[in-house]
Image (cartoon, rainbow, N blue to C red):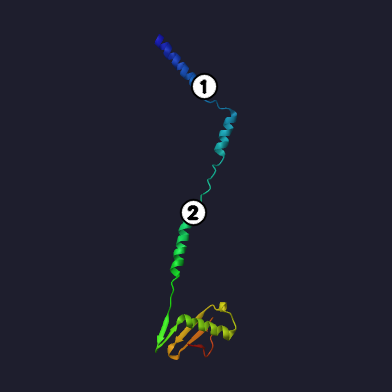
Amino acid sequence: MSVSKTTAKTAETTTKAAVKTTPVKTEESKTETAAAKKAPAKKATPVKKETTTVKKTTAAKKAVEKTEVKESVFVQFAGAEYSLDDVRASVKKAWMAETGKKESDIKDIQIYVKPEEHAAYYVVNGEYVEEGRKVEL
């Protein structure tokens, strides 16, 4: 009988310990639990990634570097040489002198180089003159 008394006391002690550690729910704790279940979970604000900005900036710098190619075009004919940059500058200067407008007014320019005549004909902003506008080279 001593074994069964010891087992009964141990079981009784275990039950008391379980009862002591189990929290008792009151009306107040029930409403807090219900409110927590009903309240929507807060959404985390998205964090901006700076890696995409760095990639875009690098790509933009590479694009700028590629467009900075220096070009020079020359027309050679019958022992004469004409730089197209010089021809373009001459045409703009002649047009501004003829019309009295500014270089910033130029929206479209077409230049036709005729090396056999040592001249360039041009049309600016679609304004065509019957005999054509001409610049001596």
The residue wearing badge 1 is: 20
Seen in the picture, residue 60 relative to 105 is either above or below; the reply is: above
The N terminus - image quarter: top left
Relative side of 49 to 39, left or right: left
Look at 42% across and 14% down and name the residue there. Answer: 7
User: Closest to the observer: 54 or 45?
Assistant: 54
Look at 45% across and 66% down and name the residue there. Answer: 63
Look at 44% across and 64% down and name the residue there. Answer: 62
Q: Residue 128 at what x, y percent from top left?
A: 53, 86
Q: Residue 19 at what x, y percent from top left?
A: 51, 21
Instruction: Label 1: state its secondary structure.
Output: helix
Residue 107 location, quadrant: bottom right
Q: Are marks 2 and 1 in contact (CB under 8 Å)?
A: no
Q: Residue 137 at what x, y percent from top left?
A: 47, 87
Relative side of 28 to 78, left or right: right
Mark seen at residue 58: none
Q: Residue 91 at what x, y percent from top left?
A: 51, 83
Mark seen at residue 50: 2
